[in-house]
Amino acid sequence: IDCAPCQPATITSNPVDATSCNDGAVVYAIQANGTSLTYQWEQSADNGLNWLPLTDGANISGSLTSSVQLLSTSGLVSGYSYRCIVSSSCGNPAISSSASLVKQQTPVAGSISGATFVCQPFPVQQVYSIAPVPNATSYDWSFNTGTTGATFIGSTTGTSVTVEFNTTSNSTYVLRVSATNSCGTSPLSNILIRKTISTPQISGTPTACAGSTQIYTVPS
């Protein structure tokens, strides 16, 4: 005979907000004490005004356990809430605090705006930028490997950068940027930049008579 007194349900650890990347799986979990505990997870689509019980199915697993998994969040909306009702064989049920669903996608960096042709005299500075990427936490600007004669001025982790071009034999640059959020890093967005290396000097007669033929040359 089990003579231990019945313990009502008490929750010792509540669920926390979870981020779903690209409609992927999320897990909500609680910890509770009590006698012969049972669990029922619920979902609210209106900030906790109304709650509906979850049932296991194609996209839900563990709705009657201490840990529920949403196998796919396709069709769900960022901001949905989840909580668990824990019951013991005695006493009133315990209700956890709610946790939110946060849906994000792997970011996509948009087109880079800025000058695609840079002329002398050097040094000269140009600003390049992209539109803010939703939910991005950082950006990373870079040039193609081996680039010389182009230097970043200031930060390279925002939506814009300042580049200083100097005299060099390099005439073509590929400026790149990626965006990062909690779901990962975007593919690189690129812009091709061309720079004048020198200003050619034209040689030839500065004046010409009508009907005459003149030859003008530039260094090869």
Image (cartoon, rainbow, N blue to C red):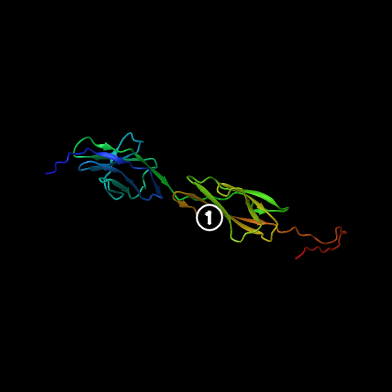
The count of marks equals: 1
Classed neighbour count for the residue bearing mark 1: other residues with Cα under 10 Å, few (<14), some (14–19), many (≥20):
some
| On screen, residue 145 above or below 99 | below
Residue at the image point whose x is 22% and y is 43% from the top: 37
Q: Where, quadrant-wise, is the C terminus in this rendering? A: bottom right
State the residue in front, 213 or 81.
Answer: 81
Work out which residue is located at the far front of the displayed protein and give it.
Answer: 3
Q: Mark 1 points at which residue?
A: 188
Q: Where is residue 25 in the image (x, y as percent from the top left)?
A: 36, 50
Location of residue 13 (image quadrant): top left
Q: Position of residue 174 (x, y in %)?
A: 60, 57
State the residue in front, 176 or 77.
Answer: 176
Q: Where, quadrant-wise, is the N terminus in this rendering? A: top left
Q: Where is residue 36 in the image (x, y as percent from the top left)?
A: 20, 43
Location of residue 12 (image quadrant): top left
Work out which residue is located at the far bottom of the displayed protein and give it.
Answer: 220
Q: Where is residue 199 in the image (x, y as percent from the top left)?
A: 75, 58
Work out which residue is located at the far top of the displayed protein and give it.
Answer: 49
122 sits left or right of 192 in the view: right
23 sits left or right of 124 in the view: left
Work out which residue is located at the far left of the displayed protein and give it.
Answer: 1
Helix, strand, or loop for circle 1? loop
Residue at the image point whose x is 14% and y is 41% from the top: 3
Query: Which amino acid, by three-letter code, is at mark 1?
Result: Leu
41 sits left or right of 140 in the view: left
